[in-house]
Image: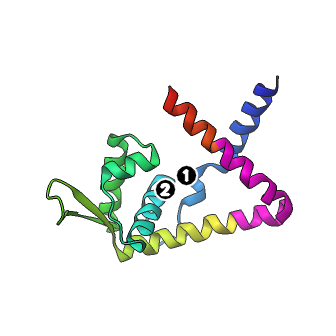
Amino acid sequence: MLDEELLAAWLRLTTVIDNQRLAVSCAADQPRLPFNEAMVCGLLYAAQASGESLTASGLCRRTHILKSQMNAILRSLEAKGAISRRQSQADRRLVELRLLPGGLALYRESHRRSVSMAGRLIDEMGEERIRTLLPLLRQAADIFETIQQEV
């Protein structure tokens, strides 16, 4: 029965969080940035900050998003002026992705909203309980990742 309780709690949590609403920008005059687009922008931001470049394939590996879905995400981000594509100077076969200033602004607004919601959860649950929860969540993610690789 514990497996059923865990599954029910997990489904409730993921339903309540609703990643699509979590990451969408609130500003009426800005384009919306759904969860997957925000995640891609965050990865591009981190890569650029460390001097790394990312390709669509690299993003697929990091996010576990299918290539067809990633292409749709990248087209949407391009249409919003958030990213650009350019041929790699090191390997002409590769197309590198860059986060543009407009994409950075969208990402920062989306990230600000997510961090605000996380802060509220910390306020409600307490710092000590969150510090206890974090290693458990990380371990659960690691285990699920291993399970997915085995399937």
Q: Quadrant of residue 142?
A: top right
Quadrant of the frame with the N terminus: top right
Sequence-first disc among 1 and 2: 1
* Residue at the outermost top position: 1
Which amino acid lies under the numbered mark 1 shown in the image of this protein?
Gln
Q: Residue at 56% across / 67% down in the picture? A: 111
Residue named by callout 2:
34
Q: Is residue 25 visible?
A: yes
What secondary structure is the stretch in magenta mostly built from? helix
Q: Does the magenta stretch include residue 124?
A: yes
* Residue at the outermost left position: 92
Q: Report the span colored magenta.
A: 118-140
The image position of residue 26, as x and y in percent, is: 56, 68
Q: Is residue 25 magenta?
A: no
User: How many angstroms separate mark 1 from mark 2 (CA)?
Assistant: 5 Å
Question: Viewed as shown, does residue 66 lie left or right of 129?
Answer: left
Q: Residue at 45% across / 75% down in the picture? A: 105
Task: Kindly identify which numbered label has been placed on residue 35.
Answer: none
Residue named by callout 1:
20
Q: Residue at 48% across / 57% down in the picture? A: 39
The image position of residue 44, as x and y in percent, is: 40, 64
Q: Residue at 47% across / 64% down in the picture? A: 42
Q: Residues within 10 Å of mark 2 (few under 14, many from 20)?
A: some
Question: Does residue 45 sit above or below 9 in this rendering?
Answer: below
Question: Viewed as shown, does residue 145 lie left or right of 89?
Answer: right
Question: Viewed as shown, does residue 69 lie left or right of 116?
Answer: left
Q: How crowded is mark 1: few (under 14 residues within 10 Å), some or many (20 or more)?
A: few
* Number of numbered discs: 2
Are the residues at dot 1 and dot 2 in contact (C-beta closer than 8 Å)?
yes
Question: Viewed as shown, does residue 112 lie left or right of 37?
Answer: right
